[in-house]
Image (cartoon, grey):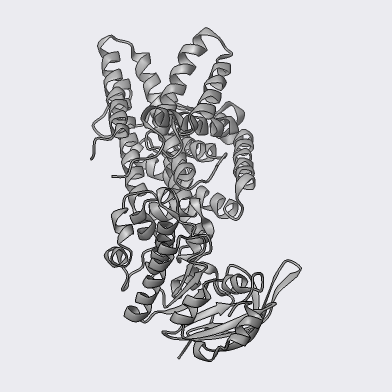
């Protein structure tokens, strides 16, 4: 690892994510840990989107689909576990579960399957049509979740106790936070490796010039589809964690506003920058908390911030802090 | 042995027909010039060969019909294109541009840097920061990294300084002498084409009007169909 300005910034952000909750434990402010957990989970969702948006240039306004699917996977499994009603009795008996290690892979697989289908259909188009199709899928899932009364419909589903993880007491905020942070770090590591791999190069190339990519024997559509599936799976995992944080899932997890928010995190932080989504989500959650306490119209200030960033720093805050172009070592 | 064969190829941009009857026969290891005035269908022919534009007629590569294949498939089969206007992946470095398209075979990063030492010196620079000539070399290198059987160069020396052009021509000469790759060349430098190419195919108004060895191409024919001799 070479000590570039970007690496230093990434290190500072990581250190902050480790130290702030520890400080919160010392001064006994558990709510700060909850806020930090929220920021970390949103970061994870945005890291997922950043693979599609930043590396692949796919402007998906439907990533809440995966966030919601992850959430509902967790919610439905936990609902069946806490009510002792099996999920299926035929052809084989499948019961609900409260084990995170079962819920997570399932949330990712279900999100990945949805991403595959949505990607397959929407990648036939590009530009504004791609945005509209992903948005349309988002709305479809949103209204479906509202009308699915078996799982709470509009009211959502409450989960009494947080899911379990071996050797960890997930109900202790700092311990649950540690799990989320570890997953975020893993996702960032995968993202960094992916960007440097030959697949990542091909994806970057496909973003920049579709025709030329074909001319060198690569199929841009399948490359983008794979990236979209990986992206959806990561955002889905974030959804499962978010449901566990709130012990509640509702159709708002599918809402297009949430898709927009995930994208806003990335735009604030820096599109295509490794820590862009993380910085963006931290700032969003911080502003939401502090400005939200001052005025219910806090989104006006967020809008202003977004405007300034888009106008004056095309690389987002990461670009503003460490320079625009990524450094090649 | 015939490597690339076009018979009665036609193609249209919407309602405007651009190719009426293109015929071309390129043998293995052959260096052929595709000549004609501007707007006569040279680049359109290349687009049909690379399957970027739908066409009709026979299009065979190594005896296999490729008319129905998608463009990435024909590239995988061994057709490498250096497109008009270079178009490197501008946010990727030189080495990344080359690696993104790499397929196993004779050509590898060290071999490309041997052919174009300038690229070797600029491995870690992003393509956007290269000069026009270097981008052209990168574009050729990128096509070679797919280890093609046939390399198509569409206006590879256009808009470059004379000294850089010379470097590119030297490189093309080296390719021919050292690797035996077949090359289809479109270029405005008639003098160099005459020196380096084995054969020529002349196109006018979307039709093949002359084909034969470069030696047998007389200045009268050249003047008539290309406008210079």
In the visual, does B225 lie left or right of A329?
right
Q: Is residue A120 above or below residue A15?
A: below
In the visual, does B122 lie left or right of B221?
left
Q: State the residue in front, B218 or B121.
A: B218
Q: Residue at image x 53%, y 25%?
A: A306
Residue A84 in view in this figure: no
* Image coords of residue B178 (percent x, y): 32, 79
* Image coords of residue A140 (percent x, y): 63, 41
Q: Residue at image x 35%, y 37%?
A: A100
In the visual, does B206 lie left or right of B118?
right
Q: Is residue B219 above or below residue A27?
A: below
Q: Is residue B182 above or below residue A306?
A: below
Q: State the residue in front, A85 or B122.
A: B122
Quadrant of the image occupied by residue A149: top right
Q: Residue at image x 59%, y 13%?
A: A297
* Image coords of residue A290 (percent x, y): 46, 12
Quadrant of the image occupied by residue A182: top left
Q: Residue at image x 45%, y 66%?
A: A217
């Amino acid at each position: 690892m070479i000590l570039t300005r970007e690496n230093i910034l990434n290190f500072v952000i990581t250190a902050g994510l480790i130290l702030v909750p520890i400080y919160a434990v010392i001064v006994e402010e558990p709510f700060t840990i909850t806020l930090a957990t929220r920021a970390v989970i949103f970061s994870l969702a945005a890291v997922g989107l950043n693979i599609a948006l930043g590396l692949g240039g796919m402007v998906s306004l439907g990533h809440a689909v995966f966030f919601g699917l992850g959430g509902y996977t967790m919610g439905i499994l936990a609902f069946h576990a806490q009510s002792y009603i099996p999920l299926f009795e035929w052809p084989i008996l499948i019961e609900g579960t409260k084990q995170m290690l079962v819920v997570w892979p399932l949330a990712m697989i279900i999100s990945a399957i949805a991403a595959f289908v949505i990607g397959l259909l929407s990648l036939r188009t590009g530009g504004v049509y791609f945005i509209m199709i992903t948005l349309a899928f988002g709305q479809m899932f949103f209204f479906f979740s509202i009308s699915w009364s078996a799982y709470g419909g509009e009211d959502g589903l409450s989960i009494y106790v947080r899911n379990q993880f071996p050797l960890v007491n997930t109900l202790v905020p700092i311990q649950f936070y540690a799990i989320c942070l570890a997953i975020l770090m893993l996702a960032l590591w995968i993202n960094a490796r992916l960007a440097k791999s030959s697949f990542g190069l091909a994806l970057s190339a496909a973003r920049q010039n579709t025709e030329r990519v074909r001319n060198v024997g690569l199929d841009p559509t399948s490359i983008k589809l794979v990236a979209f599936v990986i992206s959806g799976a990561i955002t889905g995992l974030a959804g499962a964690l978010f449901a566990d944080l709130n012990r509640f899932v509702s159709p708002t997890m599918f809402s297009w506003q949430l898709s927009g928010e995930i994208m806003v995190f990335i735009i604030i932080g820096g599109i295509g920058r490794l820590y862009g989504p993380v910085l963006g989500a931290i700032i969003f959650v911080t502003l939401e908390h502090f400005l939200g306490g001052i005025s219910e119209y806090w989104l006006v200030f967020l809008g202003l911030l977004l405007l300034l960033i888009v106008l004056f720093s095309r690389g987002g805050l990461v670009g503003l802090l460490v320079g625009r172009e990524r450094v090649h070592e | 042995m015939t490597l690339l064969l076009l018979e009665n190829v036609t193609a249209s941009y919407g309602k405007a027909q651009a190719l009426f009857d293109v015929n071309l026969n390129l043998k293995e290891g052959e260096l052929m010039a595709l000549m004609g005035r501007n707007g006569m269908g040279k680049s359109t022919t290349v687009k049909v060969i690379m399957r970027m534009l739908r066409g009709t007629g026979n299009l065979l590569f190594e005896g296999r019909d490729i008319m129905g294949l998608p463009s990435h498939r024909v590239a995988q089969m061994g057709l490498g294109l250096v497109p008009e206007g270079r178009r490197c992946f501008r946010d990727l470095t030189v080495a990344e541009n080359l690696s993104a398209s790499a397929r196993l075979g004779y050509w590898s990063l060290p071999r490309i840097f041997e052919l174009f030492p300038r690229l070797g010196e600029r491995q870690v620079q992003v393509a956007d920061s290269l000069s026009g000539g270097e981008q052209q070399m990168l574009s050729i290198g990128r096509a070679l990294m797919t280890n093609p059987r046939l390399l198509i160069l569409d206006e590879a020396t256009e808009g470059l300084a004379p000294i850089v052009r010379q470097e590119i021509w030297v490189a093309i000469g080296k390719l021919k002498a050292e690797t035996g790759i077949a090359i289809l060349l479109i270029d405005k430098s008639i003098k160099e084409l005459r020196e380096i190419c084995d054969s020529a195919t002349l196109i006018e108004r979307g039709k093949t009007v002359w084909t034969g060895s470069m030696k047998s191409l007389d200045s009268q024919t050249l003047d008539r169909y290309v406008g210079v001799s």
